[in-house]
Image (spheres, coloured by chain):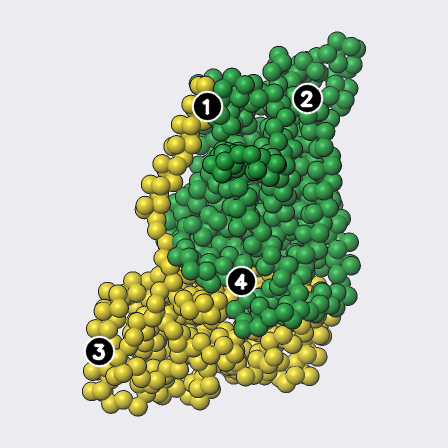
Amino acid sequence: MAVLVEDGARHAGRDSLAAVLRRAASPRRVVYALVLIILVAQVAAPIAILLYTSVKDARPTDADFFSLQFTLENFQQAFASGRLLQVTWTTIQFALGSTLVALALGTFLAWVVARTNAPFRQVIGLLTIVQMAVPGILIPVAWTFLASPEIGVLNVAWRELTGADGALFNVYSMAGLILVNGLTMVPMVYLFVVTVFSSMNSSLEEAAEVSGAAKWQAVRDISLPLAAPGIAAVAIMALMRAWESFEIPWFLGLKEKIFTYASEIYLRTSTPPSDVGLVSTYAVFMLAGAVIMIWWYDRFNKAGERYAVISGKNFSSVRMDLGRWRAPVAVLTFLVLTPVILLPLLMLLWLSVNPYFQQVSWDAITNISFDAYVAAVQTPNMVQGFLNSLLVGVLAAIGVLALSTLAAWFSARRLAGGRLLYLLTSVPMALPNVIVGVSFLWIFLIAPLPIYSTHWALVIAYITLIIAVVGRLINARMLQISSELEEAAQVAGASFLRAIWTVVVPLLSPALLAGALITMVMSFRELQTTLYLAGPQTRTAAVVMFDMAGDGQFANLAAFGIITFAVLLVGLVGYNRLNARMGLDGGI
Amino acid sequence: MSRAATTLRVAASFAAVALALSACGGGADAGQATALSEKLAVQSTVGMSDAEYAEYMKGLEEASKAEGGVIKYYFSAPAASAEKMINLFIEKYPWVKLEYTSGGTLELIERVITENAAGRPSADVLQGGPLEDRTLCRDKKLCLAYDPRGEADLPKDRAYADCGCSVGDFFTFHILYNKNKVPAAEAPKTLEDLTDPKWKGRFGINVDQLDWFAGVLAQMGEEPGLNLMKAIAANDPVAYTGPDGLEKLAAGEFDVALPQTATRQVRDMIDKGAPIGIVTTPVTIAQPDMYFPLANAPHPATTRLYMEWLMSDDWQNKVSEAVVKIPIRPGAPIPSSAEGILKSELFFETTDNFGDYDTRVQQHQSIFITG
């Protein structure tokens, strides 16, 4: 096994300086150094600002910010409301509950698509993914009109059908918040797990069945344990995302006064200028939680090679034959997809053809109008916002994928320094978007860099925001790729970079494609950080939608959501067809 | 190898698209302030004679063209309204180009403070309210002291002499009700009506409107105001947030909603048939739209031109039609949705009567949000 850091001092006395420099500048070391430098700039800077501001009562633009006077006042203030413990307990329930919902449904959908011969698999996969196209701001709105006890169409229909007085489902309850938040995270879980399942060697399951195990036992004892690194990685990500989730607990939880960590931070820091010290203090607790989970995950993956199912040995990818269970599984899958995407999509469609929300009735149906679609397309800056999101998304995807792949390789091969890269790509999961926004605002304005308000400002910030998610995805896939493949390439004369490019990257392609998709979607949806960094020419789709929502143009916003959904769907179908025509199995 | 080649092609295509788009996009960095001649760098045009004013405006127009005719506008108001407004300004001064930055109050204040602290000011004009006045003008001294001529003949309560801003228009807070669920005669007429047990749990309270809360306390006095708010909160209102509150009211999520402004969104929904009725209370809280010219504006001539236009008849007579708000100048047309104010006593919120911001936030949250 190769060792990254060699003992240069041992040779120094004997070798010439040129030889030492040549060794020090080996491609692997240069690449490592570059990745490290970029990650330190991308990740360590905002984290350093976070930690530093949490013990300061001055802001970075204040004269005494760099003085050596520190305070614990922010920590005292965080506990001062007396609500922190209660809010933390609520958040634990909310985060764990929604993570479990997302894991159960996302893993099930991924298993159906990647490991079985259930019908409509491609449709199921596409419908799961395109849910991510629904603008974040519309999700609580759609669910309010679906499942509010008073006006939600599901509850109104339930009352009319059964004559009952109460509600079938209360979206404002803790169960409601958990379900809606869990449903929004299903596509992320699906993308993680489907890439893991798709690389699974079915000969192992077949061997289990030949040995007398039932199908479900093969799934339980072979498929799920082999997918464990991917599932563990996505569980951590989902937990952190749920912990940070703001829109759903704030917009839906307010009625029943259910406050989570994110809504508490919002309440406690709503006075401008931003109380970054207090926000940072709250984030320090999250950072601690993230570090513990990363440590656990790292231990979990210590025996990384155990999960290497892609190796030089025969690879068989035969799907499990569901036999007489094909139809029931398909029905069950569409039942799962109903709340994941079909119901919110139908509600968006309904909102988009009505001037304001009305209950579904014949009168309302006869008065539907498509004006909102015309208005959405004609909204000033919509095209510009769309193109800006596309550009920033593409550039951020290139950066995120390159950094994640190299960091995952150094980490998965357990080379010296690899764990540092792993840590640097993991900890941003604990960074609140507002901290990333404010930190980069300060960095870009105080440093003599001409990138404030440019696309590059957004690209850099987005890489920091997204790298934890995509990095875990790629890392989980990398663990499945045996090192013997690239070692064989190097033995055959390939250089380090060539071995990565020709062997590792193609085998990573499902994870890379999923990562690119996640980055693109997040670049269309990210708002909090963007509001600090976007300039007049770099307003993204999310900012334009924020303006539309501020104007109360929900029909137009819903129409825009439907259009985005349709564009993404067409793009994904086209992409999958192209893959199939080229004989590749990297489709989504 | 074919996989590698395909991956390479995909990556190359991505990079090509990115570079092509990059060439089309192009972001703008913070600008540097252009120096204004001493003749134009006045603090007020209120005392100028007609001839002096005409000459001053001519000079401003030339200087505006010379500095590039750009106005960098920061606002947290609804985008459509802000754009309509600036487009009317551009109709009058066609060489002007608008570059706007939108966001929440918190982000915009943060940006202006940080940009100025870093010596890279970017905003010419910021639209906001008492909070921006306190933070940017009074605490950080970032606002330009400038009184446009149109402020000369305003009544005292509308002049906002102590503000680092000009108030071009205002909006008012009302009680709205669902006409399908509440007959007009039975709708609550005052805030006190909502303490009646018959409204228990039937009305929504919009927790985004801290300004209304501060305005009521200022108008009634601290203690009576707080007592009223606590009595309203004791009647179990449904706390709601976000701009979909009107949709919920129209759909019947609650029978009554307050405080709601009677601006464009309300008028448009009523025009489209939403069953919404408007009640104007005997005393109505009026929130000013404050426009802050910034001291380090990169385009000082266009900034002054804008402030003059804001207070001129050109804008004052179009406020109602363009943005469905109420012009600050008495006698100018007002929107139909706000006609109730003609029979009501207006109480104008100011930076001073708002009170301490942190205290108001804490009071408001503890009464209506955290309970």
Q: Are marks 2 and 3 on the same chain?
A: no
Q: CA distance from mark 2 to mark 3?
A: 79 Å
Q: Which residue is mark 3?
A: B59
Q: What residue sits 58% from the left and 47% below the top?
A: A139
Decide which of A76, B272 is in the foreground and name it.
A76
Pointers 1 and 2 in contact (C-beta within 8 Å): no
Mark 2: which amino acid?
Pro
Q: Are marks 1 and 2 on the same chain?
A: no
Decide which of A302, A567 is in the foreground and name it.
A302
Q: Chain of mark 1?
A: B
Q: Which residue is mark 4?
A: B276
Placement of B238 over or under A577, stated as above or below? below
Q: Residues within 10 Å of mark 1 (few under 14, many from 20)?
A: some
Q: Chain of mark 4?
A: B
Q: Which residue is mark 2?
A: A328
Q: CA distance from mark 4 to mark 2?
A: 48 Å
Q: Is residue B28 left or right of residue B231?
A: left
Pointers 2 and 3 in contact (C-beta within 8 Å): no
Residue A458, x across and y down, in percent: 46, 51
Give the number of the disc on residue A542: none
Q: Is residue A95 left or right of residue A394?
A: right
Question: Chain B shown in which color?
Answer: yellow
Placement of A572 over or under B316, stated as above or below? above
Mark 3: which amino acid?
Gly
Q: CA distance from mark 3 to mark 4?
A: 49 Å
